[in-house]
Image (spheres, rainbow, N blue to C red):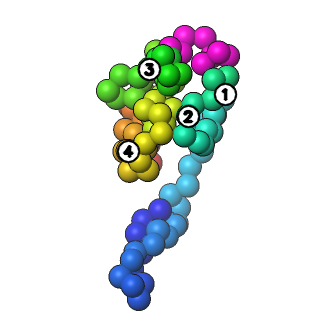
Amino acid sequence: MELGEPDESGRRSPVPVAGSEFEIPTDTVIMALGTSPNPLIASTTEGLETNRKGCLVTSEDVVTTRQGVFAGGDAVTGAATVILAMGAGRKAAAAIDEYCGGLKR
């Protein structure tokens, strides 16, 4: 996606970039939405540490205590702002890309 031209209000909306799609083979993908981490994630995934509030423990670059697992947003900080979650998502995407050796685009 990229930002399109501003509309009448001056706001730019995302528009698809033709030919930019790609697939990444995975064994597992966990999609989580909400304001607190699902306790089943840590209890069913060996090697994930949590703090006393049940949030996942990560390093500054959103790497969890289990190799190849990254986390950010409410799963790490507890309920917070969307802006912080977006920032964590951006960090996670960069860390995952680096972990995977950088994808050819």
Please state which of the two labelled residues, at mark 4 or mark 2, is closer to the viewer: 2
From the viewer's perspective, is 49 left or right of 7?
A: right
At horizontal 53% and vertical 22% (from top left) the residue drawn is 54
Instruction: Pick out the residue farthest to the left.
Output: 60
Q: CA distance from mark 3 to mark 1?
A: 23 Å
Q: 38 or 67, which lies in front?
A: 38
Kindly check if marks 4 and 3 are in contact, taking CB atoms under 8 A apart as contact.
no
Residue 72: x, y in percent? 45, 34
Q: Amino acid at mark 3?
A: Val
From the viewer's perspective, is 85 left or right of 75?
A: left
Identify the mark at residue 36; answer none if there is no mark: 2
Q: Mark 2: few, some, or many residues within 10 Å (few <14, many ≥20)? A: some
Residue 94 shows in this picture: no
Q: CA distance from mark 2 to mark 1?
A: 24 Å
Disc 3 target residue:
57
Identify the mark at residue 84; answer none if there is no mark: 4
Q: Secondary structure at mark 3?
A: loop
Q: Secondary structure at mark 1?
A: loop
At horizontal 47% and vertical 68% (from top left) the residue drawn is 14
Closer to the chain start, of discs 2 and 1, is: 1
Residue 2: x, y in percent? 42, 65
Disc 1 target residue:
27
Q: CA distance from mark 4 to mark 3?
A: 16 Å
Residue 23: x, y in percent? 60, 45
